[in-house]
């Protein structure tokens, strides 16, 4: 099946090409896909776009955003085939949402700063979704989000009605409290109790990050990178000194870890 060769393809071309791939005589793989079968693909493509942002790589970002857009086009085509909606209905919906939720731009509200703009957005969102309580707003936070991100969004929503510590000290005290409760659970509790207390500890850690204005997801992401780099240096030191990490005492490995840690801090 031929498709016109062009110097520059656009959005309408993408929609049409996806339609051809899904149609009889198209690609067997594309024809076989469902919303659920490519769910993981959508997640993977989104994270790859995020990685391009983190690496400050505009060429890769262009490519990865294209892959994300392809996922949107595929899901939209599946729904068009079922006669429920198409890509234009998606565009119509998001345009209407943007206009309604920016009353300070398209209406009679005002927003002098970022916080006021977000407050306007949240107020309109609650109204359009017919949410009458803050609990409903919290329940609307997607359960599919990574748990750290979901925790932070839930905490921000409860804080909007004043259910929050006045300073980070309160959040830190709660973190210590949950830490002690986890220790008790480890000594005396069941696995279920230990899991519950560990969850409370992690939730409290997210609360501290929120007070500090730190993206908890990003902080943990960077901690993972730091751990890998430090472990690599420990592994290298062990090899240089003839230490077999698999049979060495933990105290010996911990000593190497502290040595590397000091070296990193001096840089």
Image (cartoon, helix red, strand yellow):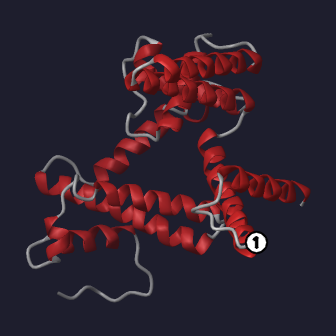
Closer to the camera in the image, 118 or 158: 158
The residue that appears at 59% across and 61% down in the rendered structure is 247
The residue that appears at 33% across and 73% down in the rendered structure is 13
- Image coords of residue 230 (percent x, y): 71, 59
- Image coords of residue 197 (percent x, y): 50, 22
- Whether residue 106 is visible to the viewer of this picture, yes or no, is yes
Mark 1: which secondary structure? Answer: loop
249 sits to left or right of 41:
right
The residue that appears at 80% across and 54% down in the rendered structure is 261
- Total numbered labels: 1
Give the quarter of the image for residue 170.
top right
View extreme (left): residue? 24
Q: Is residue 221 above or below residue 123?
A: below
- Image coords of residue 4 (percent x, y): 29, 87
Quadrant position of the C terminus in the picture: bottom right
The residue that appears at 65% across and 21% down in the rendered structure is 175
- Image coords of residue 179 (percent x, y): 62, 22
- Whether residue 120 is visible to the viewer of this picture, yes or no, is no
Quadrant position of the N terminus in the picture: bottom left
View extreme (right): residue? 266
Q: Which residue is mark 1?
A: 241
Give the quarter of the image for residue 76.
bottom left
Q: Is residue 241 above or below residue 94?
A: below
227 sits to left or right of 84:
right
Closer to the camera in the image, 243 or 234: 243
Closer to the camera in the image, 161 or 92: 161
């Amino acid at each position: 099946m031929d498709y016109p060769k062009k110097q520059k393809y656009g959005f309408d071309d993408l929609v049409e090409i996806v339609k051809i791939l899904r149609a009889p005589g198209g690609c067997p793989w594309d024809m076989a896909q469902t919303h659920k079968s490519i769910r993981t693909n959508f997640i993977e493509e989104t994270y790859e776009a995020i990685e391009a942002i983190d690496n400050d790589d505009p060429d890769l970002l262009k490519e990865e955003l294209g892959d994300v857009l392809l996922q949107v086009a595929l899901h939209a085509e599946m729904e068009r085939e079922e006669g429920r909606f198409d890509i234009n209905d998606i565009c119509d919906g998001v345009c209407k949402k943007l206009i309604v939720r920016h009353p300070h731009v398209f209406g009679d509200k005002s927003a002098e700063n970022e916080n006021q703009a977000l407050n306007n957005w949240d107020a309109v969102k609650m109204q359009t979704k017919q949410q009458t309580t803050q609990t409903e707003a919290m329940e609307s936070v997607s359960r599919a989000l990574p748990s750290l991100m979901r925790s932070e969004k839930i905490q921000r929503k409860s804080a909007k009605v004043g259910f929050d510590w006045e300073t980070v000290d309160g959040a830190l005290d709660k973190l210590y409290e949950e830490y002690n409760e986890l220790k008790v659970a480890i000594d005396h509790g069941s696995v279920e109790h230990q899991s519950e207390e560990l969850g409370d500890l992690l939730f409290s850690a997210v609360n501290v990050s929120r007070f500090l204005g730190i993206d908890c997801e990003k902080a943990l992401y960077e901690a993972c990178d730091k751990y890998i780099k430090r472990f690599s240096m420990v592994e290298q030191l062990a090899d240089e000194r003839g230490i077999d990490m698999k049979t060495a005492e933990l105290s010996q490995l911990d000593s190497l870890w502290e040595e590397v840690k000091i070296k990193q801090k001096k840089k």
